[in-house]
Image (cartoon, rainbow, N blue to C red):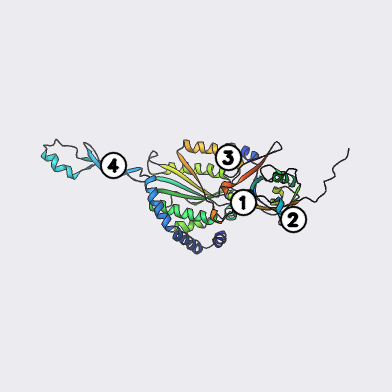
Amino acid sequence: MADSDELSTRQGQVQVYFTTNSIDIELPEGKRQLLVPTDVRRYGLSQILNSESMLDTPAPIPFDFLINGTFLRTTLDEYLTANGLSSETTLNLQYVRSLIPPLYEASF
Amino acid sequence: STHLDSTTVSLTSAAEARQQWTHYETITRDLSLSLTEQLRLILAPTLATKMRGDYRTGKRLNIKRIIPYIASQYKRDKIWMRRSVPSKRSYQILLAVDDSKSMLESGSSSLAFETLVMISKSLSMLEVGEICVVGFGEKVKVAHDFETPFSSDAGPKIFQNFGFDQSRTDVTRLVRESIALFRTARQKASSSPTDLWQLQLIISDGVCDSSEHDSIRRLLRTAIEERIMMVFVIVDDVRNKKKGESVLDLKEAKFVKDEILFGSGGC
Ligand SMILES: [Mg+2]
């Protein structure tokens, strides 16, 4: 059995529970719990929420995510590590419409 | 069930463990008895110990046949009995209980304990053979080995090994190490290898990484080749859950080449 192989291809997952205070973008009850890869950041989570299987928004809404009152600025994996948590924990993700202006990256 | 969950975390004293075991024994007593009756049929006796039959040769004389034997001028000579009826069970059963943190979060830890107590009591009442109990998560911990008889103080001792605080759920590792435990147990078994049946029950909330599926499948093939039967039992406290929170409803989102794919998650 290729142990090292198994370890290197193992991509972590964590259970999340999506909540929001905005009724207009609330997920139906059966869709709030989801297993997501631990290497996602705000952008990936926003993509997941906007997808057909979730909110199915006609035009993508950029979302920000709050865990325990603070905005997620790292990957979920980094968040877990920084807070001494493991992927056994279900993360409560509160999503809000993103208010942050697009990041200035470069001009050509 | 919240108060039960919090007591399982800090299992310290033997007295506490004993108290807990008694509690779970009490609440599962009826279920345990009816399970014993069902298992009596499912786990059929495998070892022949009873003498029976009318044979020309055998192990013990059938006294009832002696007088007809003499009276028939020694013609009715099927006077011997042999061990031919299976009457004893000779199973090696491994109960693996998920000891990972998610068990507490999903409220499955007390259900897992109920299941463990109910099954192990039934199996020992049935004198099924040898019972081994392990806890798994990041690592596999043997809480009760095959060789130790399942006496009345075995249960509380087993409980002391559980904290539901392991920070991973490595099912691949569990299956791999279980196969190794079974191999050793088969070598040490007193009954002949052909009479020996090996069975594993994995009791878990079913929340595990889907990337493990392939490696688990490979190991399961090995298990089947070695005549080990593995059963995955999912404990899910649906009474206290909202719609979509059961592991059976759990979906996963994956990124494959920048595309999001949705599938069913868990084990
Ligand atoms: Mg777990």
Distance of mark 4 from mark 1, alpha carbons? 51 Å
Amino acid type, label 2: Thr
> Pointer 3 indicates a residue of which chain?
B
Residue B257 image position (x, y, % from top left): 70, 36
Q: In this view, does A106 lie above or below B148?
A: above
The residue mark sitting in front, 3 or 4, is 3
Q: Of residues A94 and A38, which is closer to you in this image?
A: A94
Q: Are marks 2 and 1 in contact (CB under 8 Å)?
A: no
Disc 3 on helix, strand or loop?
helix
Amino acid type, label 4: Arg
Q: Of residues A71 and B54, which is closer to you in this image?
A: A71
Distance of mark 3 from mark 4, alpha carbons? 45 Å
Q: Which mark is residue A70?
A: 2
The residue under label 3 is B213
Q: Are marks 1 and 3 on the same chain?
A: yes
Q: In this view, does A81 lie above or below B184?
A: below
Q: Residue B83 carries which label?
A: 4
Residue B29 image position (x, y, % from top left): 42, 58
